[in-house]
Image (tube, helix red, strand yellow):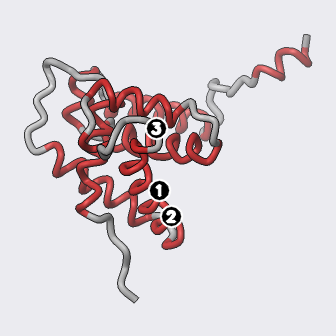
């Protein structure tokens, strides 16, 4: 059986969605970012179970074609203007149908995850994972060696008082 991969025909949908969900940064130059974005999206997509992949593809296709039902004319989401796309995204995020809201949460989470896993974006927002990782590793070693570091849980303080 052939493995289902992320279809190239859905790339314009994610490109348009990323433009709506992620705030523009003036000092962020992302040459070749879209290719990296779609590659990483495909990697995440390929980790999903096959039945989820099928459902996800159909959900994305519905998301792209449903502006007709939301009163945006005979346009697909990937062809809407920026303002119309923002209104459409808000309609999905705050709509009455729980299925649509939950699907959109998943879609949004995946777009944000892929976008903020780009090292060029880290530089612009001031995120330095190396320092954070070193700090976490040192703290873990201290805890495992029986050092002074102790994890305090909020409920422990309430019961001890």
Query: In the image, residue 101 lies at what x, y percent?
Result: 57, 40
Q: Could you tell which of marks 3 and 1 lies nearer the N-terminus?
A: 1
Which residue is pictured at 23% across the width and 62% down the height? 8
Q: Please tell me how crowded label 3 is: few (under 14), some (14-19), or many (20+) other residues with Cα within 10 Å.
A: few
143 over 77 or under it: above or below: above
Residue located beneath label 3 in the image: 70
Q: Is residue 26 found left or right of 81 in the rendered image?
A: left
Between circles 3 and 1, the one closer to the viewer is 3
Find numbered disc 3 in the image and state the secondary structure of the residue it sits on: loop
Q: Please tell me how crowded label 2 is: few (under 14), some (14-19), or many (20+) other residues with Cα within 10 Å.
A: few
Residue located beneath label 2 in the image: 55
Query: In the image, residue 161 lies at what x, y percent?
Result: 91, 10
Query: In terms of depth relative to the viewer, which is nearer, 65 or 5?
Result: 65
Q: Residue furthest left?
A: 31
Q: Which mark is residue 59?
A: 1
Quadrant position of residue 156 = top right
Q: Is residue 30 found left or right of 100 in the rendered image?
A: left
Find numbered disc 2 in the image and state the secondary structure of the residue it sits on: helix
Query: In terms of depth relative to the viewer, which is nearer, 23 or 123?
Result: 23
Query: In terms of depth relative to the viewer, which is nearer, 129 or 46?
Result: 46
Find numbered disc 1 in the image and state the secondary structure of the residue it sits on: helix
């Amino acid at each position: 059986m052939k493995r289902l991969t992320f279809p190239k025909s859905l790339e314009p949908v994610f490109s348009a969605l990323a433009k709506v969900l992620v705030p523009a940064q003036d000092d962020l130059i992302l040459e070749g970012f879209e290719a990296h974005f779609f590659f990483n999206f495909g990697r995440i997509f390929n980790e999903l179970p096959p039945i989820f992949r099928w459902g996800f593809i159909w959900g994305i296709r519905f998301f792209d074609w449903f502006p007709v039902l939301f009163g945006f004319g005979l346009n697909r989401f990937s062809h809407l203007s920026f303002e119309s796309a923002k209104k459409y995204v808000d309609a999905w995020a705050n709509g009455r149908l729980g299925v649509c809201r939950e699907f959109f949460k998943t879609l949004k989470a995946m777009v944000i995850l892929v976008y903020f896993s780009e090292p060029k974006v880290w530089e612009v927002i001031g995120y330095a994972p190396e320092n954070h990782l070193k700090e976490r590793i040192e703290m873990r070693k201290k805890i495992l060696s029986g050092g002074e570091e102790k994890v305090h849980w909020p409920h422990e303080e309430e019961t001890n008082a």
